Image (cartoon, helix red, strand yellow):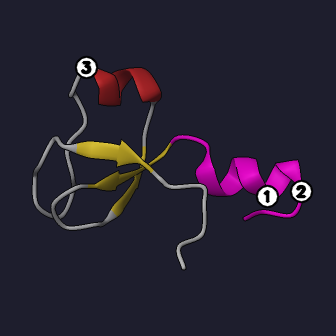
Amino acid sequence: MAKFPEAEKRIFHRVFVCRKCKSTIKADNQKVKLRKIKCRKCGSKALRPKNKEKKG
């Protein structure tokens, strides 16, 4: 987890992960909700926000 708000915003703000190939994409929240953004790598429109909690 980020130590200070500026780092948290830089790492997690408007960052999404493809559900199929796990690549990260920076995009506008509304466009992702409307499925106008697709993955550059595989072309899928199934995106989720980046997790803020560390695994493990």
Going by the numbered disc 1, the residue's amino acid type is Ala
Q: Position of residue 14 (x, y in %)?
A: 53, 40
Q: Secondary structure at mark 1?
A: helix
Considering every residue shown, the one lying at the far right of the view is 4
Q: Which mark is residue 7?
A: 1
Measure the C-alpha gap from mark 3 to mark 1.
28 Å
- Using residue 51 as the reference point, say whether residue 37 is left or right of it: left
Task: Identify the residue at horizontal 72%, vertical 65% (top origin).
Answer: 1
Measure the C-alpha gap from mark 3 to mark 2.
31 Å
Local packing at callout 2 (Cα closer than 10 Å; few below 14, some 14-19, many 20+) is few
Q: Is residue 38 magenta?
A: no
Local packing at callout 1 (Cα closer than 10 Å; few below 14, some 14-19, many 20+) is few
Which quadrant does the C terminus fall into?
bottom right
Q: Which mark is residue 34?
A: 3
Q: Evaluate if marks 3 and 2 touch, with contact meaning CB atoms under 8 Å apart.
A: no
Q: Position of residue 52 (x, y in %)?
A: 60, 55
Number of numbered discs overlaid on the protein picture: 3
Q: Secondary structure at mark 3?
A: loop
Local packing at callout 3 (Cα closer than 10 Å; few below 14, some 14-19, many 20+) is few
Q: Evaluate if marks 2 and 1 touch, with contact meaning CB atoms under 8 Å apart.
A: yes
Going by the numbered disc 2, the residue's amino acid type is Phe
Residue 31 falls in image quadrant:
top left
Residue 17 falls in image quadrant:
bottom left
Measure the C-alpha gap from mark 2 to mark 1.
6 Å
Q: Which mark is residue 4?
A: 2
**Mark 3 or mark 2: which comes first in sequence?**
2
Q: Position of residue 50 (x, y in %)?
A: 47, 53
- The boundaries of the magenta stretch are 1-14
